[in-house]
Image: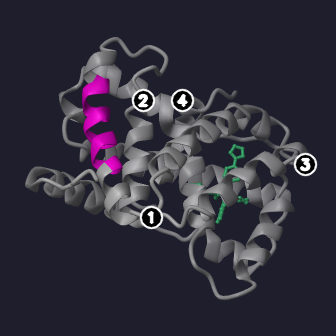
């Protein structure tokens, strides 16, 4: 039986990541807004672009707190942000969806999202992903590390020094592996299941540009930041 132990520096690293993750959250709670009232497809599209824009801003702030990120090549830092922004947004959306809510509210939220203006064919893969995240019952440490691991994916387009990214990602993977073993001794495959979600996430993120252009709205307006990050306009 493997004796797994979190070292002192791993505990420090964990604290830095979780503190940064909980600090850098977008201010307003979109789930609360969606539960308050029904919006039109146009209003929902505007809400999505506003939420996504502020989420990219907090993602940039969050990455600055990932130990080692700022010592990467500057252009590689940009390539990692650009390459992971959509995945980070869907992962965050899934985590918002998996939050514990008073009974019946998750169903209302799901209904509002289904009717938000997203075209039918993307609703299924999106909720399949959300429900697979819900079923993991992730704790905050796992959510923060999974987002960090997603950002630190070495094979994003235009990353020059992939080894440097790999080294930092491996540190985070090792920490997450230990956490999973300690957190869920009765579920030896849990770590592998967590990483499997990143594959689903990447697949879902392939649809995002099409999801945007097929949104039932007359005016697909994007902020300059989203034009930068999303392959639209
Ligand atoms: O605001 C949202 N997500 C934010 C983004 C930043 C971080 C926090 C959440 C949206 C929301 C905007 C208003 C209409 C209805 C959807 N949302 C989404 C969503 C839906 C589609 C897309 N698309 C991406 C490309 C094309 N579509 N992205 C996110 N899933 C959600 C799950 C929730 F529990 C949930 F509460 C909202 C969610």
**Residue situated in front as seen by the camera: 208 or 104:** 104
Disc 3 residue lies near ligand 1 with CB under 8 A: no
**How far is the residue under mark 4 from the one under mark 1?**
44 Å
Write down the residue under mark 4: 228
In terms of sequence position, does the residue under pointer 4 or pointer 1 come before the other?
1
* Left/right of residue 3 with respect to residue 98 in the rendered view: left
Write down the residue under mark 3: 120
How crowded is the residue under tag 2: few (<14 C-alpha within 10 Å), some, or many (20+)?
A: some
* Left/right of residue 217 with respect to residue 89 in the rendered view: right
Can you tell which of label 4 and label 2 is closer to the viewer?
2
Q: Indicate whether 170 appears above or below 75.
A: below
How crowded is the residue under tag 1: few (<14 C-alpha within 10 Å), some, or many (20+)?
A: few
**How far is the residue under mark 3 from the one under mark 1?**
38 Å
Can you tell which of label 3 and label 1 is closer to the viewer?
1
Residue 105 percent across, percent down from the top left: 72, 82
Q: Which residues are magenta?
A: 165-177
Residue 215 percent across, percent down from the top left: 83, 45
Local SS, label 2: loop
Disc 2 residue lies near ligand 1 with CB under 8 A: no
Q: Indicate whether 41 appears above or below 218.
A: below
Can you tell which of label 3 and label 2 is closer to the viewer?
2
Write down the residue under mark 1: 186
Write down the residue under mark 2: 153
Disc 1, disc 2: CB below 8 Å?
Answer: no
In terms of sequence position, does the residue under pointer 3 or pointer 2 come before the other?
3
* Left/right of residue 117 with respect to residue 162 in the rendered view: right
Residue visible at 37% across and 44% down? Answer: 148
Residue 221 percent across, percent down from the top left: 72, 41
Local SS, label 3: helix
Residue 171 lies within the magenta run: yes
């Amino acid at each position: 039986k493997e004796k797994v132990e979190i070292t002192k520096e791993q505990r420090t690293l964990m604290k830095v990541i979780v503190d940064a993750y909980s600090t850098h959250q977008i201010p307003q709670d979109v789930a609360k807004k969606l539960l308050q009232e029904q919006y039109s497809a146009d209003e929902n599209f505007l809400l999505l672009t506003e939420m996504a824009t502020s989420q990219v801003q907090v993602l940039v702030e969050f990455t600055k707190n990932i130990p080692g990120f700022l010592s990467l090549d500057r252009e590689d830092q940009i390539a990692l942000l650009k390459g992971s922004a959509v995945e980070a947004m869907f992962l965050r959306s899934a985590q918002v969806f998996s939050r514990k809510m008073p009974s019946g509210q998750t169903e209302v939220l799901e209904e509002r999202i289904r009717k938000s203006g997203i075209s039918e064919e993307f609703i299924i893969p999106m909720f399949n992903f959300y429900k697979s995240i819900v079923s993991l019952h992730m704790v905050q440490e796992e959510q923060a590390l999974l987002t960090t691991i997603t950002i630190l994916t070495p094979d994003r387009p235009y990353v020059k020094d992939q080894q440097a990214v790999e080294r930092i990602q491996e540190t985070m993977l090792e920490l997450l592996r230990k956490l999973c073993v300690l957190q869920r001794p009765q579920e030896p495959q849990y770590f592998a299941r967590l990483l499997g979600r990143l594959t689903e996430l990447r697949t879902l993120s392939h649809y995002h540009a099409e999801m945007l252009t097929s949104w039932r709205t007359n005016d697909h307006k994007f902020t300059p930041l989203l034009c930068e990050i999303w392959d639209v306009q």
